[in-house]
Image (cartoon, grey):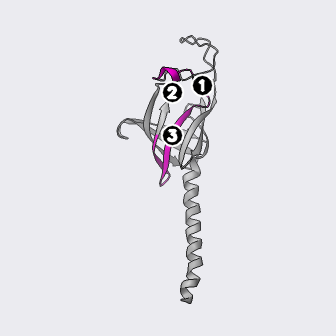
């Protein structure tokens, strides 16, 4: 009985340390990430138990003076969205990543990523490598049919 009582604090300490380590892994994608072309920064944050992301910076926040869509000099908007009522929402602050959960082994799954260039949402998988590289794989149907982009801190 005495041995069981002394083992209990040790087990509790191990469980606490283990939960802190795994929690740190899950939150290691939080923060600001540069897109592959370095034209935008995406802030990844917790949204309840899931992970989400929004555009926090645009290198060119306004449309070019040569914009063929008639919006020269105006702030960039989500004009390729298939829903007409969403086409005038600003890109700055736009939510791109939603619904991801930590699946272990530096991988987040179950979410979707929005591409404002074509106005479509894709299933996606996120993998953290080397602590400062985020690999996002967007796909249709299965992961085999998709594209990977690498973001950096």
Q: CA distance from mark 3 to mark 1?
A: 18 Å
Question: Bounds of the magenta span?
Answer: 82-111
- Comparing 131 with 13, the one in front is 13
Q: Residue at x 58, y 27 (%)?
A: 91
Q: Residue furthest bottom?
A: 2
Q: Earlier in the sequence, mark 3 or mark 1?
A: 1
- Look at the image and tell me in which quarter the C terminus lies: top right
Q: Is residue 115 above or below residue 133?
A: above
Query: Closer to us: mark 1 or mark 2?
Result: 1
Which residue is tagged 3?
Answer: 98
Q: Earlier in the sequence, mark 1 or mark 2?
A: 1
Is disc 3 surrounded by few (<14), some (14 to 19) or many (20+) residues within 10 Å? many
Q: Is residue 132 left or right of residue 136?
A: right
Q: Is residue 12 above or below residue 50?
A: below
Judging from the image, what secondary structure is the residue with disc 2 in? loop
Which residue is tagged 2?
Answer: 116
Is disc 1 surrounded by few (<14), some (14 to 19) or many (20+) residues within 10 Å? some
Residue 124 at what x, y percent from top left?
Answer: 44, 40
Residue 123 at what x, y percent from top left?
Answer: 42, 38
Q: CA distance from mark 2 to mark 3?
A: 14 Å
């Amino acid at each position: 009985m005495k041995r069981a009582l002394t083992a209990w604090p040790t087990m509790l300490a191990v469980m606490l340390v283990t939960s802190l380590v795994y929690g740190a892994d899950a939150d290691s994608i939080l923060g600001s990430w540069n897109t592959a072309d370095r034209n935008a920064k995406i802030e990844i944050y917790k949204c309840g138990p899931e992970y989400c992301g929004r555009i926090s910076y645009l290198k060119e926040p306004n449309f070019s003076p040569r914009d063929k869509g008639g919006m020269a000099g105006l702030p960039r908007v989500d004009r390729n969205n298939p829903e007409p009522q969403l086409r005038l929402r600003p890109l700055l602050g736009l939510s791109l990543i939603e619904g991801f959960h930590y699946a272990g082994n530096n991988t987040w799954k179950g979410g979707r990523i929005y591409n404002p260039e074509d106005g479509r949402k894709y299933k996606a998988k996120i993998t953290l490598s080397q602590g400062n590289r985020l690999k996002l794989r967007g796909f249709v149907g299965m992961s085999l049919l998709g594209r990977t982009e690498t973001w950096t801190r």
